[in-house]
Amino acid sequence: MKDIIQLKDRRFKVMITAEEIDRAVQTVAEQINRDYADCETPIFLGVLNGSFMFLSDLIKKIEFENEISFVKLASYEGTASTGNVKNIIGLNGSVEGRHIIIVEDIVDTGKSMAHMVEELKEHNPASVEICTLFFKPNSYQGSANIKYHAMDIGNEFIVGYGLDYDQVGRSLKDIYVVTE
Ligand code: IMP
Ligand code: MG
């Protein structure tokens, strides 16, 4: 592992190692295993691109029968005033009556998740919960309960383990934080 890396115009330094991430993923998987033990075939709904690595590690630790699906959030085009509103792309198959666990890389202001939960609820699922690898509690402005958050961080900008800086850095197995 390199301690300092350069991505485009920024320098980043190691903040959280792959081993620490794995321990946090294990803890959150155990919570989910307890909570969903009696639910019929929940659906893990990964939000692309950022969640791919987290979901792939999380799902290996899940002990109940499940389905896996992926969606993308696309900025709503048409009105400038709704710049933060993102629509769900790729929701195929019915989620009606199903237990949904949204899997996200990071919840920051919470705007993306707030809209996603709202849109999903129009499809009448049995339940919707959010499972995020990283949570920025000081930045969060949402009202939705973030039931599963593997690690809480400050307002710093991080990359790696699926998270990108201008599309690069997603493949790093450790988490790096931007330096001055
Ligand atoms: P929110 O709608 O403000 O909660 O933003 C969530 C989205 O912003 C995440 O899914 C990421 O794509 C992106 N994001 C927020 N913070 C970071 C960060 O520190 N590193 C990389 N992406 C981030
Ligand atoms: Mg994301």
Image (tube, rainbow, N blue to C red):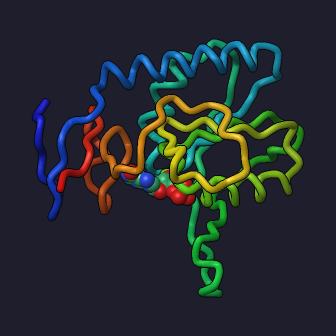
Q: Residue furthest front?
A: 138
Q: Position of residue 147 (x, y in %)?
A: 67, 33
Residue at image x 18%, y 48%?
A: 12
**Residue 140 against residue 131 in the figure, above or below:** below
Q: Please identify the quarter of the rendering in which residue 29 is found.
A: top right
**Residue 126 against residue 93 in the figure, above or below:** above
Q: Quadrant of the C terminus?
A: bottom left
Q: Nearer the viewer, residue 91 or 50?
A: 50
Q: Nearer the viewer, residue 56 or 180?
A: 180
Q: Position of residue 88 (x, y in %)?
A: 66, 60
Residue at image x 56%, y 33%?
A: 149
Judged left or right of residue 138, residue 99 is right
Q: Quadrant of the N terminus?
A: top left
Total marks placed: 0
Q: Nearer the viewer, residue 148 or 55?
A: 148
Residue at image x 63%, y 61%?
A: 89
**Residue 3 against residue 28 in the figure, above or below:** below
Q: Nearer the viewer, residue 50 or 139?
A: 139
Q: Position of residue 71 (x, y in %)?
A: 60, 52
Q: Please identify the quarter of the rendering in which residue 87 is found.
A: bottom right
Residue at image x 11%, y 42%?
A: 4
